[in-house]
Image (cartoon, helix red, strand yellow):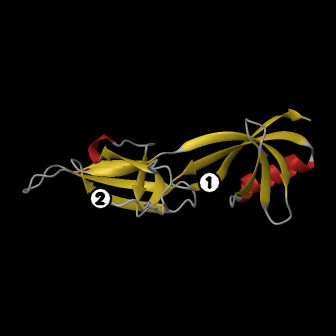
């Protein structure tokens, strides 16, 4: 054998998958599904009867959890669909910068500065108004498939 060392260039992450497989027939309303590479929340499921060639089909109508677009997909009920790992984490709001980024306090005391203000106008106004009034605000951040976005707001009282 040779005495030379082997160097491997790794461009992979820890290997935690962004999705997991689930049989299409078991996905229900209010569940999550990946359609056209986007994480979505299922708003409607209808199943057709088995046809001449044997597969019942599931028709999914879902809404993208980050941009609100409506997507549809039809999958044989026995086939697997990708389901995104969706997490919600609460952070305390520390600051809002002029360029539209928020500064959040994590549970372990560090700050998280890589999130933009939400694009939803109603939620955006609530956050800006509450922050301007000096309230203690806790924002819920939804993360799935490498994307994160503020999705909800809680007021925990004045500072």
In this rendering, position of residue 28 left or right of residue 53: right
Name the quadrant containing residue 146: bottom right
Quick check: marks 2 and 1 in contact, CB under 8 Å?
no
Q: Point out which mark residue 148 bears.
A: 1
In this rendering, position of residue 122 left or right of residue 83: right
Mark 1 residue crowding within 10 angstroms, few (<14) / some (14–19) / many (20+): some
Residue with the most extreme top position: 157
Residue with the most extreme bottom position: 99
Q: Position of residue 85 (x, y in %)?
A: 48, 45
Residue designated by label 2:
74
Marked residue nearer the N-terminal end (2 or 1): 2
User: What residue is shown at x 87% (from left), y 48% (from top)?
Assistant: 131
In depth, the one of 129 and 159 nearer the eye is 159
User: What residue is shown at x 11% (from left), y 54% (from top)?
Assistant: 51
From the image, which quarter does the C terminus lie in?
A: top right
Q: Position of residue 52 (x, y in %)?
A: 7, 56
In depth, the one of 67 and 34 nearer the eye is 34
Which-is-in-front pick, marks 2 and 1?
1
The residues tagged by marks 2 and 1 sit, at their Cα atoms, a distance apart of: 27 Å
Q: Does any portion of residue 147 appear in the rendered image?
A: yes
Q: Point out which mark residue 116 bears.
A: none
Disc 1 is placed on an element classified as strand
- Does 4 sit above or below residue 47? below
- Does 7 sit above or below residue 157? below
User: What residue is shown at x 73% (from left), y 35% (from top)?
Assistant: 107
From the image, which quarter does the N terminus lie in?
A: bottom left
Disc 2 is placed on an element classified as strand
User: What residue is shown at x 43% (from left), y 43% (from top)?
Assistant: 31
Q: Does any portion of residue 126 appear in the rendered image?
A: no
Mark 2 residue crowding within 10 angstroms, few (<14) / some (14–19) / many (20+): some
- Does 11 sit above or below residue 86? below
């Amino acid at each position: 054998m040779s005495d030379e060392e082997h160097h491997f260039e790794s461009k992979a992450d820890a290997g935690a998958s962004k999705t997991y497989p689930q049989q299409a027939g078991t996905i229900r309303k209010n569940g999550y599904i990946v359609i056209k590479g986007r994480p979505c929340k299922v708003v409607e499921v209808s199943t057709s009867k088995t046809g001449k060639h044997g597969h019942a089909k599931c028709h999914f109508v879902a809404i993208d959890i980050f941009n609100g677009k409506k997507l549809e997909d039809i999958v044989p009920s026995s086939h697997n669909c990708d389901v995104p790992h969706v997490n919600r984490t609460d952070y305390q709001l520390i600051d809002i910068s002029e360029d539209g980024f928020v500064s959040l306090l994590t549970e372990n005391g560090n700050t998280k500065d890589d999130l933009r203000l939400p694009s939803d106008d109603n939620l955006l106004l609530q956050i800006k108004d509450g922050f301007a009034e000096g309230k203690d605000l806790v924002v819920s951040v939804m993360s799935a498939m490498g994307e994160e976005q503020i999705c909800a707001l809680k007021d925990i009282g004045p500072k």
